[in-house]
Amino acid sequence: MEATEADSQAFVKILEASMVSFLPMAINAAVRLGILEILQAAEQVAEDEETTLSAMEITARLQGRTASLEETETSLNRILRALASHGLLTATSTGSSVTRYGLNLSSRFLVQSDILPSLSHFIRYMQDPVTLLACSKLDQAVLHGGNAFAMVHGSAFFPFTQQNKTYAQTFNNAMSGHSQLFMIKFLDTYGGLQTLHSLVDVGGGNGDCLRSITTRYPHIRGINLELPHVVEKAPSYPGVEHVAGDMFVDIPKADAIFMKWIIHDWDDESCLKILKNCHRSLPPHGKVILVEFILPDIVQESSDDRLAYYLDINMLGFAPGGMERTKGQFETLSLASGFSKLDIICKFYGMSVMEILK
């Protein structure tokens, strides 16, 4: 039977979906090889962001190579062209069979630097064997309940990180890089901090979000509420007080409470406990500033929505009861916790900034 164009596209779509996991593997390889830093260094030397390098020129700059120059160039070019095909690098061939590669807006987020934050640790975390192995049990989580991570590793995600310091550091680095990049955009977009005098970041990790906030608004006293094992290693930042505690027990009092990627880790019952504790700790007219992905009510195919669906699958595998939610689900939790209303203030990088008002 002759295949129609629609048949062919459908067939290729399934094959591509089956092999799409090779894309983050290729990104991880580029990060670990330092390819992005090599491309950036070439730009800096030439003082031109349009500077490009061939696979051979990049190969000559790689550290730790034991294969021949030609063998490494061939292997490297295969990774580079795959990344370029997904719009993660520029690729130009002008009158020559040699392709030259350069950074673009997307790949610049992966460049590791002492000056600017990076998503490089995020890709390392997502490609860590501990992370990948847990994803192999998603079907079992559907059939038997629980979560895939615990099925594979013998404990839930957060208890596991307390015992496995190397993986915990990988995770913390990923969250730190993401938060630092997010906060640059957040502070330029969200205008609801100026009148605050104190702010609690619930589950604020190393305090990166509060550091950004108190740097921009030095009059704000930042309180970073985290578990004891996180607080004991958290760096000191001006205007930020690290407080060891448990959001399910008590939350320090402040004018407002900030939570980024916290609510999605928990089931509804746990979220109600957290939000009720927030409500008790806030003054009249206080607010919770909530940063989360919001699922559409009807299935959509945009990049932002797909990202939310991917993260929702991640919650299925890693967080018992955790999930991404619709606006309506966030509103239901907020009202049941004693708050009066929820407003979506702005959206960027796929995430929504909400205010839950007392």
Image (spheres, rainbow, N blue to C red):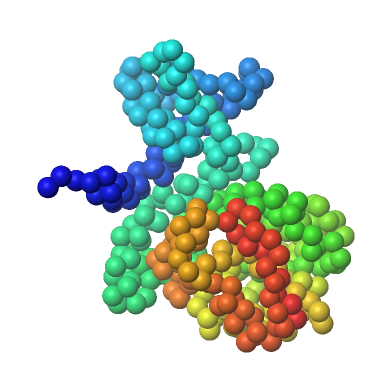
Residue 271 lies left or right of residue 69; in this view the side is: right
Q: Is residue 85 above or below residue 190?
A: above
Give percent across and percent down for residue 356.
Answer: 70, 75
Q: Is residue 75 above or below residue 121?
A: above
Question: Residue at 74% of width from left, 77% of height from top?
Answer: 357
Q: Residue furthest left?
A: 1
Question: Residue at 64% of width from left, 48% of height from top?
Answer: 181
Determine if residue 249 is in view.
no
Residue 196 lies left or right of residue 271; in this view the side is: right
- Quarter holding the C terminus is bottom right
Give percent across and percent down for residue 327.
Answer: 59, 73
Which of the 4 image quadrants contains residue 66? Answer: top left
Give percent across and percent down for residue 133.
Answer: 33, 57
Give percent across and percent down for residue 155.
Answer: 40, 70
Question: Residue at 44% of width from left, 19% of height from top?
Answer: 93
Q: Is residue 48 above or below residue 111?
A: above
Residue 63 lies left or right of residue 334; in this view the side is: left
Which of the 4 image quadrants contains residue 67? Answer: top left
> Which of these two is toward me, 35 or 332?
332
Which of the 4 image quadrants contains residue 70? Answer: top left
